[in-house]
Image (cartoon, coloured by chain):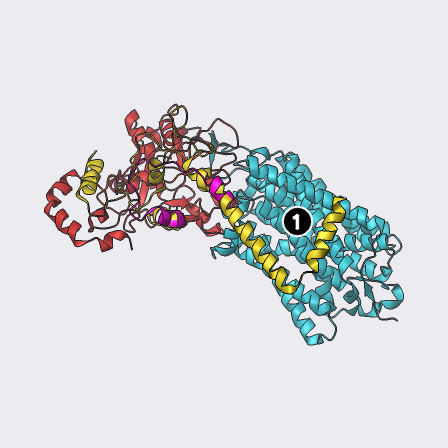
Chain colours: A yellow, B cyan, C red
Amino acid sequence: MSVLMFAQLAISIWDLGAKMKKLLILVLMIFAFFSTAVLAQSLFPNIPKATGNEHPQGNEFMRINHMDMLRHERDMTMREGIRDVDNSLAQCISCHVVKGTDSKPVTIESEEHFCRVCHDFAAVKLDCFSCHNSVPEEGLKTSFKHPDANGSLNAVMAYLEETAK
Amino acid sequence: MERIKYSELRSTPKLWSLLAILVGFVGAAALTVLYIEHHGHIVTGMNNQIVWGLPHVFAIFLIVAASGALNVSSIGSVFGKQAYKPTARLSSLLAMALLMGGLAVLVLDLGRVDRLIIAMVKYNFKSIFAWNILLYTGFLVIVAIYLYAQMARGVHSFALKAAGITAFLWRLALTTGTGSIFGWLVARQGYDAAIMAPMFIAMSFSFGLAMFMLVMIGTCTMTNRRYAVELRTRQARLLGLFVAVVLYFTAVQHLSNLYVAEHNGFERFILLEGGIYTWLFWLGQVFFGGIVPLTLLFHPKLDVKKGLVVLAALLVVLGGLVQLYVIIIAGQAYPLEIFPGYDVSSSFSDGVINQYSPSYLELILGLGGVALALAITIIGMKILRILPVNLSDDNVDITQV
Amino acid sequence: MTKEKGANIHRRDFLKSGAALASVTLASGVTLMAMGQGVAAGANPNVRWGLLIDANKCPSDCSACISACSNEHGWEDNGLPTDPQWIRKITLKDKNTGHENTLPLMCQHCEKPPCVDVCPTGASFKRADGIVLVDRHICIGCRYCMMACPFKARSFVHEKVKGQKTSSPRGKGTVEGCNMCVHKLDKGEGTTACVTACSATGNNAMIFGDLNDPSSDISLALTNYPSVELRDDLRLNLGVRYLNI
């Protein structure tokens, strides 16, 4: 019964004039666009807040470019041994640590790990943590350079303090 | 004497069931790859002492056989033996199929299979391995062009000859490169020998022709097509010659090593005290893989006894796998001589013969590669006009052989 | 290329005035790049790091170097043939005289490393200061370097790794080996975990230092005592040398 109705609907659409068909397709596309947008809004990940200061470049910049920055500096560190790079992975992790229910940092195995929250949403597989530690290590200084050492007195004093320890 | 006609294989239930079995093996191999990739190589028999195992034995066998399978085409277009030309198309197809099967096994055994793209774009040109990657992919392209030249109408004979010569020279470079993977390892007693490159060339002639004959006889029998007895016998005798050459190179390699005091320990291991490896060498490689096929293939009544040809080719193939097993595994089983003149022991298997027991996963992966190669060949013969229809004795000019 | 080159005037002026304070509180070896001046730290091509090991001072029952390396880099050897071994103790017995000796063996950091030659992707590489490393970002796990190494220095990671040390990332499917504690060297600590541990036991069998510096401890020791390279027939010019074997 419903098959017949469906067939009749299909035929009536098929019989529409060319202009009407184009209008119908446009309406359907707009509907699809907004519905996915609406769906996306409701599924958008709840990104955990970081523990340190904001990135001077802004969050959007970091979201788009963090892979390029990491990859460029990994070669500097790996091949040339330059370790006081602007963004070391260990430094990212120490700021972007997420504490679990036992108030210990969650590893990459957990869905709540900072990197996984966005990467699971975007369905982009993470390879870093098959080798790298995904939680901050106790007592380890992560960088020589403070993340926002771009001139502020506090930043420089903090840097000097850190390296003097 | 008619013109040789080629046609695609017809869809018969026999063909489909064979293809289904082969695809089954390929599927099983794919599942093992996923399993190994997920759990890590701890699930295989390979370890830090025996780093290359059974999958590499199969992979190198298929790659070596691939370059040898092209021989039949080369004898036709490069060396002008007209009688070999009807089987040239299958030879080219089989060469590509075997190489694809071998490469599949090789790359699927990598520790990081997901980084294959990196291997294809980042090259260290000092590495013979990197050169081999280029040689293998280049081989596929060149043989594809060669096959096109063989099959297309209106191709100038000069173009065909040029393609044939290029393919022939390329496959010599490829096999030299494959042999040099082992021959250029100065560290190990069992390798570090310049003779490995020409020995691999000889092995490629032998294994490649054996695989070709098995596929040709098998397919012709299955599809009731003629395989000219004179041609088959000539090719079988040629296989006998190649087997003899491989035995010669093996003898030269071991005799040279025996002369050098430094390598005596390794030779003692292979020839006398290696347990399983000694058995495999003498019984598997030399006797069943060399002497027995040799006697079979020089039998005076070989033309009427098709069974002997099949048996000999099968023994050559199995003997080849054993030979590669001895080369690859025994070469790693024998310990490194870091401190000559000392008895060495440590917590990392120094100074002892390294143990290896291949796991079923590795065997399935290796067989999957063979199945992939055969499946590609059959599919190729199904959609392209590869196999001759009327290759009977009347249509083969034996004076040209 | 880094941001430091474009450091703004404001910071430079401030720091020049506080330079005295800065120079007192800076840790040794820390790069001055952050201050907009000074040489880059890291791989210095004028340096060649090396080790000298005295087999006579190495007791057969001591494995401090191995424990130190395991702890520093987060690997464990439980005796399985698939377990990693960045450094191992070897017991040598002269076939003719019966004299016994023990010594630690690790990656020899050759000047002409066979592992670097054979790596298809270039993941196995030699740094400017002579340390031979694996770039595990591009290692495909083919294990050809393990076939090529005359000293069996490299290990393949056979299973998933958890709880890695931050300074020593290691993961399944790639190859690893002694890296002369590069993370410590780059921070300016000037020594490795194994050497520190050996000194702590009082055996002092291992000396680490710059082979290109004629006044370093290791260069002085090499001048004064006859040392050997392992497998010197291969002419690889190793960075690790041994005494009394």
Q: Quadrant of the C terminus of chain C?
A: top left
Taking the image as shown, residue B126 lies to the left or right of residue B86, namely: left
Q: Secondary structure at mark 1?
A: helix
Q: Quadrant of residue C230?
A: top left
Q: Quadrant of the N terminus of chain C?
A: bottom left
Residue at 19% from the left image edge and 53% from the top image edge: C8
Q: Does residue B32 sit above or below A64 in this rendering? A: above
What span is in magenta? A39-65
**How many marks overall?**
1
* Whole-percent x, y for residue C64 in the image: 36, 27
C184 and A156: which is toward the camera: A156
Residue at 65% from the left image edge and 54% from the top image edge: B99
The answer to whether any part of residue C52 appears in the image is yes
The answer to whether any part of residue B203 appears in the image is no
Q: Label 1 sits on what residue type?
A: Phe
Q: Which residue is mark 1?
A: B61
Taking the image as shown, residue C227 lies to the left or right of residue A113, namely: left
Q: Is residue A43 magenta?
A: yes
The chain identifier of the residue carrying mark 1 reads B
Disc 1 crowd, CA 10 A, few/some/many (<14, 14-19, 20+): many
Q: Does residue A128 sit above or below B10 in this rendering? A: above
* Whole-percent x, y for residue B321 in the image: 68, 45
* Whole-percent x, y for residue C99 in the image: 41, 28
* Whole-percent x, y for residue A32 in the image: 55, 50
Residue at 85% from the left image edge and 59% from the top image edge: B227
